[in-house]
Image: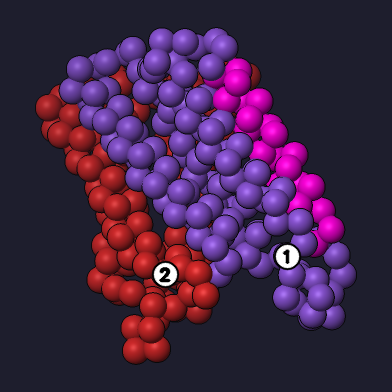
Amino acid sequence: MPLLTRWFIKSALMYLTVSLLVGVALTAQGAVKLPAVVDALMPVYFHLFMVGWVTQMIFGVAYWMFPHVSKENPRGSEALALVTYLTLNVGLIARAIVEPILAFQPAPAWTVTLILSAVLQWIGALAFVANTWRRVRAR
Amino acid sequence: MPRLSCWFIRASLAYLVAGFTLGALMLTLKAVARYRGLGLLMTPHVEFLLIGWTLQLTMGVAFWILPRFEQGTSRGAVGYAWLAFVLLNAGVILAGLGPVLGDAGFIRLLGRAAEAGAAFTFGLHAWRRIRRTNF
């Protein structure tokens, strides 16, 4: 299993745990009084689960298991795969932190960071598709 | 990788890009304008990523790797899987773009029915391939 796949899958497992803990907090909010910021965590909960866990697990396994480009260059561009990993994760973590804060404390710095997080995640998806497209081919 | 898996997986990659593009746009609008009217973009965003990306990729990989018949040369009733591909993509486009086209009701319902049909026909294809093997 390549190094980047291990990073993808271990990160995915961490997001799974964190997303389900956020789910616990969202559910507990009805029963006990938690800080108001918890109310703004619903989109974070969805995206930690769907992007951090599901999509990242797919990225890691696809990078590992999809048909090889060639013997010399089995998994395409390692640089693009690294860009995928870094942009997706930095973007997602920034979003998870800033989106709830922005709901309560609007400030230009948070606005810029949230936009940056959107752009980073978008670049991550593009980089994955750019690297994976040529590995999806009929034999 | 069989040809149909290539179609499934490449279509799923296209939906990944489309879904993330809509998501990035929505997050930017939310950051800049406190834009609350995201419903119009939300429907295709969710439809493209949940059904178009994850479900379609799953079907493509399943068609590729599930056990085959006749010493590994046949994937059985391939026609059902092709029908699933057509129904799934028609469904995602209709259910995702229905509200954007101004019809949230009938077109979206038609799309959801097509998606359910895709699930059924893919199940018809895959059912016999899910069996005991020697490896």
Quadrant holding the N terminus of chain B = bottom right
Is label 1 in contact with label 2 (beta carbons under 8 Å)?
A: no
At horizontal 39% and vertical 38% (from top left) the residue drawn is B19
Residue A4: image x %, image y %? Answer: 39, 71
Residue at 34%, 51% (x, y): give it.
A125
User: As displayed, is residue A54 above or below residue B118?
Assistant: below
Quarter containing the C terminus of chain B: bottom right
What secondary structure is found at the residue carrying circle 2? helix
Residue B75 is labelled as 1
Residue depicted at x 20% and y 35%:
A115
**Does the magenta run of residues contain A86?**
no
The chain holding disc 2 is A
Q: Nearer the viewer, residue B132 or B103?
A: B103
Colour purple maps to chain: B
CA distance for labels 1 and 2: 21 Å
The stretch of residues the image draws in magenta is B108-129
Q: Is residue A40 above or below residue B3?
A: above
